[in-house]
Amino acid sequence: MVLFRSLVKRASDTTGSRHAAPWHYARHHSTGKSNFVRIVEVGPRDGLQNESRPIPPPIKAELINRLGQAGLRNIEAGSFVSPKWVPQLAGTAEVLSLIDPIPNTHLSVLVPNSKGLDEVFRVLSASVSPDSAAKPPPPVTEVAIFTAATDAFSRANTNVSVSESLTRLEPVARAALAKGLRVRGYVSVIVTCPYSGRVDPRRVRDVSRELIQMGCYEVSLGDTTGTGTPASVRTVLEEVCKEIDPSRLAGHFHDTNGTALANIFTALDLGLRSFDASVGGLGGCPYSPGATGNVATEDVVYALAGESFYGDIGEPPKWDFGPISLPLLAETGAWISETLGRENTSRAGRAYLARKRREQQLAEKAQTRAKL
Ligand SMILES: CC(C)(COP(=O)([O-])OP(=O)([O-])OC[C@H]1O[C@@H](n2cnc3c(N)ncnc32)[C@H](O)[C@@H]1OP(=O)([O-])[O-])[C@@H](O)C(=O)NCCC(=O)NCCSC(=O)C[C@@](C)(O)CC(=O)[O-]
């Protein structure tokens, strides 16, 4: 109970209200639009759920610790879903018990139903029981609930139709909010469904509205297959923004066809300021065959840092990410890719490390010459 009170306080410290967006926008003086871009790191969850080999909890915990050290302030740490459906994410409770405290950071976990939420409560309560008084609670402040824009995908992913999934999620959201947790919603397959093809943007709008009405502070719109282009993403977002303010929406773009960054810029143009990304471009969804990982966090940071998005109106604003360090992110992307034996798909991360190696070689040559 003590923990839940402190969670309510922590949430309201930053939100002012449980349902409001939990960060403050710095407004650009001429356009009134914000320059602050929130990055939600989904590598430890979306990234790792698609790996073929089991990943030991200490590796997952180290990934989260490194991401925290790199300055990420919103990290999706894992999920409490059925291990029969996604065996890779079994062990999230152990992962949470192994991570270091990360100040000012929101950790979230994905839950599909009440059973998953009960597991979150159990983990949080266990760590404040008198028996474990010495152990601080894992800093989970948020749960993510998820559904889809098509029945076919929803059934493949969670065994129920969209409307059944919304019915199942409503009490989950209510219970999480009652305990002071923030709730974020996902809508998958906003552009194309791998089972039923092209998606009607009005479906995306309607499902997003339902999630907002349940109390989600933000809905993350997932181009799960990574087939979206700036044109198709614009069509969907324009439809959703008819009913939902862009400050309550996030973009979640898989990079299957190399369009994720272009889609992010399209979304920025429409007023979205929150994006999911995955260090090293990890991941994919087990129920979206052929789709690759999310856009790499390093690439998003590189592409937006210093970008004068509002062109020549007065002093060009710089995108602000808070404390995120590209060098530390690049090291983390390289480390996790090597650890998993997979390709690091972050172009910006690889370019940074190659430049660093070249600089080191030049410095070594200079030292050798100086000694001669
Ligand atoms: C929703 C269910 C559980 C329905 O699965 P089901 O088989 O219909 O449900 P069930 O209630 O019959 O449960 C089956 C078994 O799982 C257990 N179970 C049931 N719930 C839980 C739980 N929470 N935690 C642990 N165990 C659970 C339950 O106890 C039972 O065990 P048994 O009695 O057979 O031994 C299942 O379909 C499921 O877990 N699906 C999750 C799939 C998933 O995680 N997909 C990836 C995440 S979504 C995503 O990646 C997209 C996103 C968000 O990134 C955005 C984008 O890119 O689009």
Image (cartoon, rainbow, N blue to C red):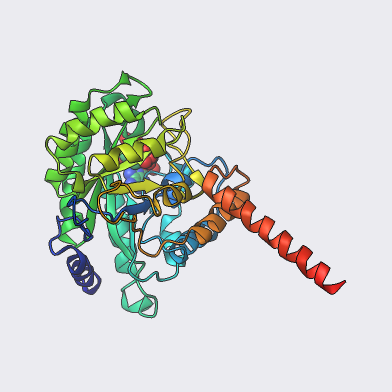
Q: Residue at x 88, y 71 (%)?
A: 372
Q: Nearer the viewer, residue 368 or 226?
A: 368
Q: Position of residue 97 (x, y in %)?
A: 43, 66
Horizontally, is 187 left or right of 349 in the view? left
For the point 46% across and 66% down, the residue is: 69
Point out the residue furthest to the top here.
197
User: Is 368 on the left or on the right of 64, as rendered?
Assistant: right
Q: Nearer the viewer, residue 37 or 180?
A: 37
Q: How many marks?
A: 0
To which quarter of the image does residue 29 belong? Answer: bottom left
Q: Is residue 172 visible?
A: no
Q: Residue 196, relative to residue 224: is it above or below?
A: above
Residue 306 in sight in this render = yes
Question: Residue 166, located in which quarter of the rendered image?
Answer: top left
Question: Residue 28: image x %, image y %?
Answer: 22, 55
Ligand 1: give its quadrant: top left
Q: Is residue 23 above or below residue 114?
A: below
Q: Tell me: residue 272, above or below residue 128.
A: above
Which quarter shows the N terminus? Answer: bottom left
Residue 265, image x, y percentages: 34, 40
Residue 7 vs residue 213: left or right? right
> In terms of depth relative to the viewer, which is nearer, 42 or 312?
312
Residue at 35%, 53% in the rendered image = 39
Task: Give coordinates of residue 176: x percent, y percent.
Answer: 20, 56
| In the image, farthest residue toward the right | 372
Residue 43 lies, with reference to residue 187, above or below; the image says below
> Which of these two is toward me, 289 or 273?
273
